[in-house]
Structures are given as C-alpha cells and as structure tokens.
Amino acid sequence: MSSYIKFVEKNIRTAWVKEWTAEFLKGLSALFTKETIENYCQAKKAEFESECQKRTKNKDSETGWQNSAATNMSQIRNAIKAWQETTKLDESNSYPQQTKEGIVQQHLALLTMNYPSDFHKERMQPTNEKKAEQRSNLEPIQCVDEYTQKIDELLQSADHRELTVGLIAATGRRPSEIWVTAQFVQVGQFEVEFTGQIKNKGEEREAYKTYTLVESFKVVDALARLRRMPEIKELKKQTLAEVDSGRNNKMNAKVKEYFSSLINPPMGESELSAKNLRASYAAIAIYLFCPWKQSTNQFITERLGHVSDATATNYEDYQVCDKNGKPLTRGAWVERINENMIPSKEGQAGNYRIRMTEACKEYFDDTEFLPYADQISRMQELIRLARIGKSFENGEIVNQVIVTQNVESRQVENTSEGEEMKEVTETAKKPIKVRDLSEVSNADLFGSNAPNTGLEKIRRAVQAIKAFNEVQPEKASRWAINTKVLKDLTKSRTSVVENYLNSDEGRINVTDYNLQHGFTYQHNRGKGNITDFVKLV
C-alpha cells in the first residue's frame, strides 16, 4: 500500500483518512469495468460515512458527521485525481467532463465519491441560520487601544502559547499557520507580505500583503522567537491535523484568559476561540486601514486571503464602536500606513562576518547538536547555551541528573473491607529557617507553607518524576513533566510553576527532557493523577 501513499500525502490532512484512501485506491486500481467500479465505490462510500459518524465528537449534532464527510471527501477526490494521472483511462473506466480547459476524461470513481447539492444544502442549514442571526447582532468592540496594548504585551512573552495568541490577534492568521507555515516579510510600518497560507480548495496561495494591528517589526520578531522555541520545533514532525488536535484546547484557554475581558464571543457561541480573534482582527483592520473607496467585504477578502467574497462573510461577527455602542468611522490609521518602517531585529540579519576554524564550523553545522536548518537560528541557540553555561558557573541553575540503582517501585495495595486508609495529617506547619533549602528534608519542605519554598518544591518534584520514569519498562507508563503534574505534586500556584518552566533551568530540566523522551502534550492523557504514582513525603 506504500505505493499509494504519495497520492494521499499532499492532498489529505487527517491521518485515518490518509490510510483509508490509500487502501481505497489500492482496491480501485484492480477494477476495470463500470459495474465493478460503481459497486466498489458505493460500498466504500458507505463504509467511509459510517467511520465519519463514529469519529464525530458532537454526537448530538445531526449534521456534524456530514460536515466532516464533506471536508474529507473533497480531499479524497483530490487524491483520486492525482492517482488517475498514472492510470490508463478508457471508455470502460472513465467518463468525459466539460471543464474550463475543454473536455477531459475523469475516472468513474469521481462520480460516486461525491455529494450532491442537496446534501450540502442540508448540512449547511444550521450553520447558515446561525450565521444570519450573528450578522443581525454584531458584537461591539469598544476598546481598540486596550486590545492592541494586550497584543503588545503578548508579543513580548516568553510563553509560546501567549506568543501564539498575540500573533493570531495581530495578524488574523490561523493557529497552524502561526505554528508551522507562516512567513512574514516587512513591507510597511503596519504591513507585511504573508506566505504559507493553508491550502484553499487544493491550491497554494501566492504571497499577498496583509495589515498588522501593531507595528510590523513586533510581529516579525515575535514569530522568529516563537519558531526557535523547543515546543514549536517539535511540531515539524507532525501533520497539520495532528498539530491542530494537539494544541488548540490549550491555546484557546489563553485566548479566553487574555481577551474575554475585551470582547464577547459572537451570538450563539459560549466561549472565545482563535476563530473569534480572526473575526475581531477583520473588524479592527477595517476600522484602522480600510479606505473609503473600497468595500469592506473586498478589503477582508484580500487581507485574509479568501478565495471568494462569500467566504469573507464568515468573519462578519464584530464591529468597532464607541463607548455608547455607536459604530466608528473606518480608516482611522490610513495616514499612518506611510509612516517610516521600524526594521525588525529578529526577522532579518545584518551583513556580519564571523571567522571560525574548520573544527569550529563542523560543530556549528552539526544538526544533532544544533538542530536548526538556518545559521541564524543556530547562532541564537549557541548564545542561549552560553547564557545557560554562565548561569551554571554562577550557581544560579540546578540541573537534575537522575541515577537510579536498585530502586523498587511501590504499588498501591487495595484495602480490605472495613480497613481505613492511613492519612498523613498536618499538625503544625512550622516556618523553615534553614537558609539552604536543599538541606531540608521532603517532610519538612512539603509540610511548610513558608514563602520562597516553591522553587525547591518544584525542583524536588521534577527529580522525583524523572526517578520514577527511569524504572518504568515502557514509555506508556512514564510521565511527561508539565504545569499540571508539578502543581498536583507541589500545590504551588500556576504562576510559580510557569515561571520555572519558562526559565533557562526549566527548559533544561523539563522542556529538553520531554523532547528527548518524545513526550507530547497528549502523553499523560488517561493516566489519572500523578500523586497516585510519585510520592514526595
């Protein structure tokens, strides 16, 4: 079946649909008559629809599986068209079709592997009704200054999730574009040339200009810093579908955290999401940059890269208003478009020459040591490692190196009926007076709520998780280290844990550790609570 993978790899995003289509094409290639092709395709189409229904998350929606089937079927048809280029088409297995280029022969499978207009009309009805209601009740944006200030703050963050949300809000791009495909080149103070738009109807979009809601250099620099983060680097190994499914929930939580006080979700939606930031971008971009002579629909079609005016209407959820709810005049920053552009520092390189020996260059070009494709990123990584080394030299960083010998894993025994579970009770939490917390026992450390003990608790928790993982025979029984497990073990505040994870020490002991062992965001799913496996007291 590997010979059919090449037809699905570029045309289909979802993993299970790729496998299904490769198998479908393998069976199809052995059929040469109209009757056998039609019977085979009808049976496989029914099988495909059953699988879509099974995999639909919203079981209460009557049209949920239909939307999934329609999206995937469009990609399956593209795979069939790619495959038929390598197949001999004749009267027994094809039919003539009128196209813009004239009459062409198409494989008979394309007649069955398709949905009629009535099917699409039925599945789109709930969406169109919801859209009509939202268009009649646009949500106001009454705080453009606060909105752009929030973007400025997020673009300075060292947290990859906050950076992502800031870039979505500033540019109106999709999450997967920000994480993987987008490239921005400055062309003006508030304008960039964008490439890397996710495919529309199977076609790659050419580069086009789009506005940024803050100065363009901030956007270019923020994207460059985001792409160099280890958490984002690992996404290159995943498909776009895997990227979306693995990160959208955590990213949408940040959307709600930072923008729920500024804008409401559109009518009929309960919570903010990245899609809403794309819609709010459209409204604010119209208010700031749309000329009077241009229709707002055409403006958004061009600046968000839509293939049609109809698609642009999907983002008509908001309008910019004053404090009294009265719509504001558009084009507020049109004159600012011609401001002198502040160049980015991260997104472009000066013409500097660095002399090095051949031996040094071998290390510099070693992608195992410096796993980046470009020299700028490698130099950034060398500087980061040098900073970490200096911190080690100054005693500012603790590196947890775990060596386990003769460690026996403790198992939780079931208690018999009537036997009570033993509980550790805290009688008196005395303040710790020892200056060096590394000398304090676990019992005293975790039995105290004294200030400034959080960092040492987190260090002990990281060490304990690593020690537990070392004696596990399989990867599935090991634990990825993240905010949740560290909070559960230490009872520390989220901000304390995340400050550690974003520090150089945290990146060495946690981020690099997770990447080295192949632990993704999904790794701990279904494992229960870390406190049932790792004990600190």
Image (cartoon, grey):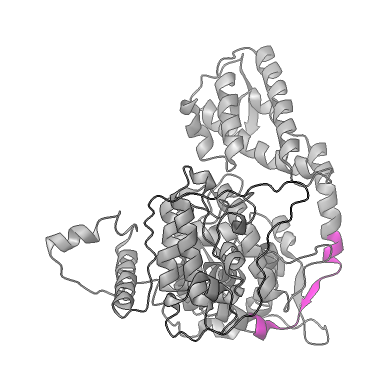
Residue 85: x %, y % from top left: 50, 28
Indicate the position of residue 5 as horizontal and vertical percent values. Answer: 49, 32
Q: Identify the image quadrant of the C terminus.
A: bottom right
Q: Which residue is drawn at 56% across and 70% down?
A: 167
Image quadrant assignment for residue 277? bottom right
Q: Is residue 106 left or right of residue 123?
A: left
Q: Tell me the magenta residue range.
A: 132-147
Q: Is residue 442 left or right of residue 128?
A: left
Q: Total marks drawn?
A: 0
Height in image: 388 above or below 433?
Answer: above
140 falls in the magenta region: yes
64 to the left or right of 108: right
Q: Where is residue 509 in the image (x, y as percent from the top left)?
A: 42, 64
User: In terms of image quadrants, where is residue 374?
Assistant: bottom left
Residue 70 in view? yes
Report the front residue among 495 and 134.
495
Q: Looking at the image, which is closer to me, 49 or 91?
A: 49
**Quarter holding residue 515:** bottom left
Residue nearest the viewer, comparing 323 with 33: 323
Q: Can residue 191 be seen in this view?
A: no
Residue 89 sits above or below residue 340 on the image: above
Q: Does the magenta stretch include residue 496?
A: no
Q: Percent x, y for residue 118?
A: 83, 38
Residue at image coords 60%, 80%:
449
Image: 458 above or below 241: below
In screen coordinates, is 121 left or right of 178? right
Judge by depth and name the residue closer to the eye, 465 or 343.
465
